[in-house]
Amino acid sequence: MKCPSICNRPTVLIIVITDDHVEPRCFQSILNQDYVDFACIVHYLRPVQELNKHANVVRNLNAIREMALLTEYKHFFFVDSDIILPSNALSSLLSHRKDVIGGWYRMKSGKFWVSAKWVADNTMVHLAPEYSVTKTDLVGHGCMLLSMRALESLYFEDGTDLKCIVETGEVCLGPCATFGNLAARCGIEMYMDGSVICGHIDRLNGTVI
């Protein structure tokens, strides 16, 4: 049953990021949310020739951030266009009243989940879903709820010029990890919600991981 909208509930802007199109299953999963007090926009990544893919995504995310800061929404839900949300995603994430909280989804390889913690200097390990709400150092931007306070304090960085060690060896730090590092410097804690398990569509063959 849909949750009724009442005056004192937070108002949410759902921001869907895509460089091509929104997968129908993603869009339908947004429409199926049991929390309905939201608006939704689709932001198409504008390519810039001199920027690499990560840098272009970050440039667009910061443009969205500037736009969102001018609105009166209290929360901002970032969703990638190939993510399938469970129907409770928005209501559950909001219920925990965290500045930054994400839902779980797998990386395209299917091997790891998009969340991780620092365990040593320059070394991260990926986490796996737990039923409870757990602290993390990395929330995937593909399913991430931010409060206005977080959006005012944080911005997006490329991170491809930085390296860290994970289970498979040395990799670029990337936008999600650099965002987490900035949150830590600003004293903003980040969490993962174990009741929000998303599907991740492989656009090459349409399968969901």
Image (tube, helix red, strand yellow):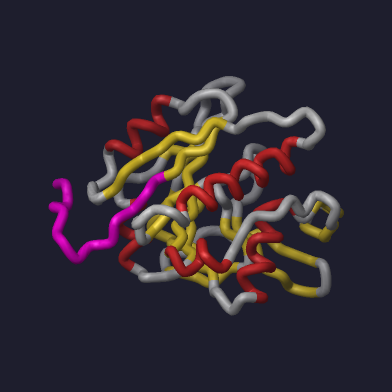
186 shown above or below 100: below
Residue 181 seen in render: yes
Instruction: Look at the image and tell me whether residue 209 can be seen.
Output: no
User: Residue at horizontal 56%, vertical 68%?
Assistant: 153
Where in the figure is residue 206, as x and y percent of width and height? Answer: 52, 23
Name the image quarter holding residue 128. Answer: bottom right
- Is residue 32 shown left or right of residue 67? left
62 vs 203: above or below? below
Percent of width and height locating residue 158: 74, 50
Count all numbered tags in the image, as a single digit.
0
Observer-nearest of 149 and 19:
149
Helix, strand or loop for the magenta stretch, by majority: loop
Q: Please say whether residue 11 is one of the residues in the magenta stretch.
A: yes
In this view, the residue farthest toward the top is: 205
Q: Nearer the viewer, residue 185 or 137?
A: 185
Name of the residue lying farthest toward the front: 70
Tell me: residue 146, above or below residue 63.
Answer: below
Left or right of 149, for residue 163: right
The residue that appears at 40% across and 29% down in the rendered structure is: 25
Which residue does the image show at 53% across and 46% down from the upper left?
A: 64
- Asked if the magenta segment contains residue 21, the reply would be no
Which residue range is magenta in the image? 1-14
Location of residue 187 by image quarter: bottom right
Q: Which residue is more in the foreground, 158 or 116? A: 158
Residue closer to the observer: 12 or 208: 12
